[in-house]
Image (spheres, helix red, strand yellow):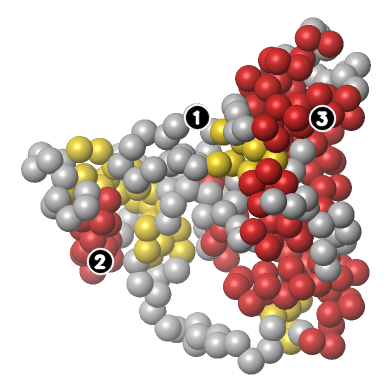
Amino acid sequence: MRRTVHLVSAADCLALRSLHQPMLDGRMQAVLRRRLEGVDLLALAAAAWPLLHREPQRLPDVARAVGGRWPQAAVRDLADALGVLLPLVQTPPRGMWGHRSAPALNTTVEAWLGRPVDPEPADAGALVLRYLAAYGPATSADVRAWSGLTGPPAVLARLAPQLEVLRDEHGRRLLDVPGLPRPDPDTPAPVRFLPAFDNLVLGFQHRERVVDAGFRHLSVGGARFVLVDGRVAGTWSTGPATDGGVRVHVSPLRRLSAPETSEVATEGYRLASFLGDGAGGDVVVAAPGA
């Protein structure tokens, strides 16, 4: 969803790709329309498909191979368009643990899974229910922000008999799947270190439930957040430690109390040990703004 890379099951890939194709086309046009002026997108896709179907390749290499018909278009823009026009799978090995990231190689879904994507879009209602089961209670705008789909109000209206309606502190209408556990608001939330672009932050339109408005922009830049009592309270990065392990560096976005600092450091040591395969490591919690 949202034109980002997702790890999904084969069944979800086959079922959901067609559902999201209109959204993908719309976002591509919004970004690339002027840069791809004069490019026959259907011809571009047709020319690239056999190359990508034959073996995994870098999209820029494929764009360069077929882009001679459109010399006015940049290779990077043609490559970007191919990621929308064709149902593709990013193949392993990529992002291997402990290794620098290899170039992204893509092949067609049909070549990788042995069958093409389902031509008919999947039921958006089933996807919305899965979203609410994971991230509810949520507003209609939250559903749209997470999925990129344009029709959540109509889908939610159809699902209304199956949903529970609540209100947040601002009076916004929240929807949820009935019967799921909902902790008491005073339940303490342990410190957690999130990866970049985590859905816990990006999966809502109203992100102030997790991150203050003044720091919302950091998520777009790929910041990795530290949650304290369920809210973004800092960012984290890594580097080498003096003992050969991993150093976790925490940059608070607000002043942390002594107990909070201790909890952040404890969880940070666990993270350092995990990232270093148990090789030790250390944690530095900087002063706010440092």
**Circle 3 SS class:** helix
Residue 18 vs 105, above or below: the answer is: below
196 left or right of 288 in image = right
What residue would you read off at disc 3?
45
What residue would you read off at disc 2?
263
**Circle 1 SS class:** loop
Give residue 21's position: percent from left, percent from top.
82, 48
Q: Quick one: label 2, few (<14), some, or many (20+) residues within 10 Å?
A: some
Is the C-beta separation of discs 3 and 2 under 8 Å?
Answer: no
3D distance between C-alphas at marks 1 and 3:
21 Å
Q: Tell me the amino acid under the disc marked 1.
A: Pro
25 left or right of 209 in image = right
To which quarter of the image does residue 264 belong?
A: bottom left
Residue 103: mark: 1
Give residue 177's position: percent from left, percent from top.
69, 83
Residue 143 vs 113, above or below: the answer is: below
To which quarter of the image does residue 147 belong?
A: bottom right
In this rendering, does residue 261 appear at all? no
In this rendering, does residue 157 appear at all? yes
3D distance between C-alphas at marks 3 and 2:
52 Å
Q: Tell me the amino acid under the disc marked 2.
A: Glu
N-term mark: 3 or 2:
3
Q: Which residue is drawn at 88% across and 59% down?
A: 120
Q: Quick one: label 1, few (<14), some, or many (20+) residues within 10 Å?
A: few
